[in-house]
Amino acid sequence: MANPTSRITSILTDPLTLAIGASIALLLIGELVSPGFAQGQQIVRLLTVAAILGIVAAGQNLVILGGREGIDLSVGAMISLGAVLAGNMMNGQNEMIPLAILVAAGVPFLIGLVNGLGVTFVRIPPLVMTLGMTAVIQGGLVVYSQGVPSGQAAPMLSAFINRPFLFGIPGILFVWVLIAIAMWFLLRRTAFGYAVYAMGSNERAATLNGIPVRFVRVMIFGLSGLFAGLAGLCVIGYTGSSFISVGDQYVLPTVIAVVIGGTSLAGGIGGYWGTMAGAVALTILQSVLITLNMDVWMRQVIFGLTLLALMLLYGRQKQLRV
């Protein structure tokens, strides 16, 4: 029987618990710095922003879980691509929303598959492959849009993202919950999820046990592109318009959110619930820094130092609890 003290210690040091605790502490700090920071409507707004980060981080989570030092640096460009394609597809027309969703998710999914094929069959390191793809996408967006912001969100999409949908909660938060349930089911209740953990822990052993490692790795990069494209759709719904670098700001935060949630950068250990908590904590941290009138470059420095600190603390450990 487990020692109650050790069990309590284990719970308190669990990354999910720490991320939730950090979120609460940051809300209190924000309230002290700017009264009203922790009020209901402000919290809903923060969760809306966190949902966008959390959606794209779902794909990043899969890539990192898959091991081989996998990080998808192209998610920022994929978000921009999804936002630009969706904006131009809708152009302010509600009836075009279904097609915009299909295109915004489908095109990045196909590009993600190309990333996966390059990593899996050509053996290009994930960082190199996705960084190169980022340049290709950004160049294509410049040609497509001529460097000028184009496209407009449909009113129904903007209302779904920004306004109360049910019980005073925006629709995007319900979508995020559905994605969380789908991620949990995928990772914990399907053969595909078991394969992701297995190859992230030991790819050679997974291969010897008959797991289709190549197929799974290609698919996780495809899913990373799909989630990034959906996040791009949410971005244009949130802001109303898009530009070709709108997704750049999400690249580093997606990695930090995944690591805050307890997913090992070595792969094979972690889960999406922690990533969700990490996205919330990171969003609140960013809001507190903005409230303190910190410059963008200083916020980037803090994010970078946060990632390095987390890696030193537990990001690469193999014994983390999931």
Image: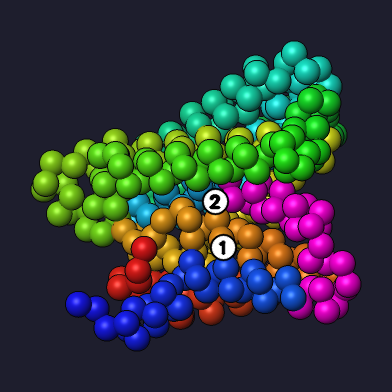
On screen, residue 279 versus residue 12, left or right, reads right
Residue 248 image position (x, y, % from top left): 68, 51
Q: Which mark is residue 278?
A: 1
- Of callouts 1 and 2, the N-terminal one: 2
Q: Is residue 49 magenta?
A: yes
Q: Is residue 132 in view? A: no
* Residue depicted at x 59% and y 43%: 176
Residue at x-position 39% and y-position 60%: 270
Q: Which colour scheme is used?
A: rainbow
The N terminus appears in which quarter of the rendering? Answer: bottom left
Magenta part of the chain: 29-55
Quick one: quadrant of the C terminus?
Answer: bottom left
Instruction: Assess whether residue 110 is covered by the magenta stretch.
Output: no
Read off the residue under disc 2: 57
The residue under label 1 is which amino acid type?
A: Gly
136 up-or-down from 1: above or below: above
Q: In which quarter of the image is residue 151?
A: top right
Q: Are marks 1 and 2 in contact (CB under 8 Å)?
A: yes
Q: Identify which residue is drawn at 22% across, 38% down.
A: 212
Is residue 76 at least partly visible in the picture? yes
State which quadrant residue 115 falls in: top left
Establish if 308 lies above or below 175. Answer: below
